[in-house]
Image (cartoon, grey):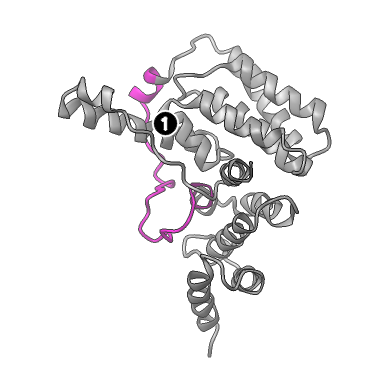
Amino acid sequence: MRLTSVVCLAALVALQTACSPTTPLFVAQVTTGEVAEYKKLKNDRMTAAVEEEGDLLTYSAQAIRDGKSAEAERLYLSGYRNTHYGPEVRAIALYQIGLIYMSRYNDQRNDSKALEYFQRIDREFPGTAVASHADARILMMRQRAKEPVQKNARELLATWKPQLDLDLNKPSLDPDMTLLSRRAVLKDRVGEAEQLYRLAVSDPAIPADIKEKALYQLGLMYMAADNRHPDREKAIGYLRHLLVDYPNGDLANKAARHLDQALNQGAP
């Protein structure tokens, strides 16, 4: 179905925020203080997972936070099985599943399953950019397996401290930026995020609204105040691309405002 495809690809390119599931039964069984403690643990879990693995998309990080690994796996597999998408996009789906299951901050961590998905990328999508990323994660997992002490997610979170250079809620970041975009800007990995978003723009099977969102994120990243290597011309180019291709899109007005801002920055 088209709706399923749209939701899946939105997850693939980290452009659409997944709704947090409600847990009325759980909430009814704990006190207010325990609920607050649980929420903090979940937020810390997601931040820690993103700090450790910069390739996690927003939807993947939320799945780790909310204990929804299996649900995320099913959603990504629906994208992988859609042969209308190009090999890079389909490989990303398998790669994200592997990242979810290898995360040390995931209570549902499963290194064997993660390794299986990474090796599957090598078999089915050799030569893709994602395959080289998967190979690096395979080596990382083999090194981890040699560690004498294997702590679980809760034990790791008990001693975890946030990185000072990765405040994902930093006020200077545009509120419309995705988790992927925020981390890319703060960790000086905008070029890598650009490649991912450009996959969405170039793949003919990706729905128009996702392409529009990808162009918007590209513009936001390159004009971000926290970007160590901002590129005004690139930001202008991506925002203009959005407005030319999607003049009536949901993001047209926002893109126009940002474009005016970028143009005025260079005015004499």
Q: Quadrant of the image for the N terminus? A: top right
Q: Is residue 43 above or below residue 143?
A: below
- Residue 226 at what x, y percent from top left? 47, 60
Residue 50 in sight: yes
Q: Which residue is drawn at 79% across and 28% down?
A: 122
User: 84 and 184: which one is in front?
Assistant: 84
User: 188 and 209: which one is in front?
Assistant: 209
For the stretch drawn in magenta, what is the main secondary structure? loop
Q: Residue at x 83, y 33 (%)?
A: 126
Residue 181 is inside the magenta segment? yes
For disc 1, the marked residue is 65
- Residue 43 at what x, y percent from top left? 35, 36
User: 244 and 108: which one is in front?
Assistant: 244
- Residue 140 at what x, y percent from top left? 64, 24
Q: What stretch is highlighted in magenta?
A: 154-182
- Dot 1 falls on a residue whose secondary structure is helix
The outermost residue toward the top is: 148
Q: Which residue is drawn at 60% across and 68% down?
A: 231
**Mark 1 Cα within 10 Å, few/some/many (few <14, many 20+)?**
many
Quarter occupied by residue 87: top right
Q: In this view, does 179 lie above or below 241?
A: above
Q: What is the three-letter code of the residue carrying label 1?
A: Arg
Residue 99 in sight: no
Q: In this view, does 217 lie above or below 78?
A: below
Q: In this view, does 142 lie to the left or right of 171?
A: right
Quarter occupied by residue 247: bottom right
- Residue 252 at what x, y percent from top left? 53, 71
Residue 107 is inside the magenta segment? no
Quarter occupied by residue 26: top left
